[in-house]
Image: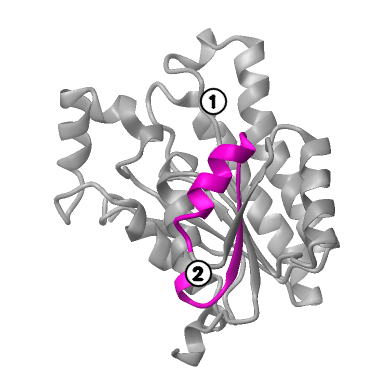
Amino acid sequence: MNPLFDLRGTHALVTGATRGIGLAIARALSACGASVALTGRQRDTAEQAAATVPRARGYGCHQGDPAAIAELFAELAREQALPQVVVINAATNPVLGPLLDISAEAWNKILQVNLTGALETARQGVRHGARCLLFVASVAGLEPIEGLGAYSVSKAGLLGLMRALARELGPQGVRVNAIAPGLVETRFAAALFADPQRYHDWLRRVPLGRHGQPEDIAGVAAFLCSPAAAYLTGQTIVVDGGGRV
């Protein structure tokens, strides 16, 4: 194991990791030697995903529920598996359309899960000894995507949250960073893939000429969570095939 990427003896938590980017990150951290707790809204689904990852266990946790987040960390404490690395990946986007047409219910749900829940997970992580926080944001947080207004706002807020925490927690030796993926082939992005015109318009702006795979994000996550990134905090790494060049 290259010592720069050696996570043996480290406990990691990856939220929203039953599939897609979250599951790929869990696998990448495990490959670096970490023991991984991964979450999904349903415990049985999380346990099924964990069964495919060495040294992983699955837990049910809804990131929009502060009580569920607190109970997750209490359970990890009972199992002596409190994470030194916390990857906050869980997110939701139940609507597609103009921002001014969004219902208050949908708006509140998106912000509760994507932003408030992310803060609560980070808060619990740091209170229980985490030394590395990684937020999975989106290029939508840097430049709003048409039809995904509320989601874009939540991810812009997430990047602001990351920078604020990096400044506050740096003196304690806690690193805080973010990844902003571009278009990645996941169930979450299915609506964009289902629209051929939007997909080709997007792809035309990507110098590498392809959309991303979850593993493209996972490698960057492993770097940011490893000793190789020991002097890196408050940064957003854009992983979009060069779409923002």
26 relative to 192 in the view: left or right = right
**Which residue appears at 57% of the width and 47% of the height?**
47
Q: Quadrant of the N terminus?
A: bottom left
59 relative to 195 in the view: left or right = right
**Residue flagged by tag 1: what amino acid is it?**
Ala
Judge whether 9 appears above or below 220 on screen. below
Q: Quadrant of the C terminus?
A: bottom left
Mark 2 burial class by Cα count in 10 Å: few <14, some 14-19, many 20+: many
Judge whether 190 appears above or below 234 on screen. above
Please name the residue that numbered disc 1 is placed on. 150
Task: Find residue 53 and report its horizontal and vertical position in percent.
Answer: 47, 60
Tell me which numbered mark, 2 or 1, is placed earlier along the sequence: 2
SS at circle 1: helix
Q: Which region shows up in magenta?
A: 30-53
Task: Find residue 36 and report its horizontal and vertical position in percent.
Answer: 59, 63
Q: Quadrant of residue 198?
A: top left
The answer to whether any part of residue 156 appears in the image is yes
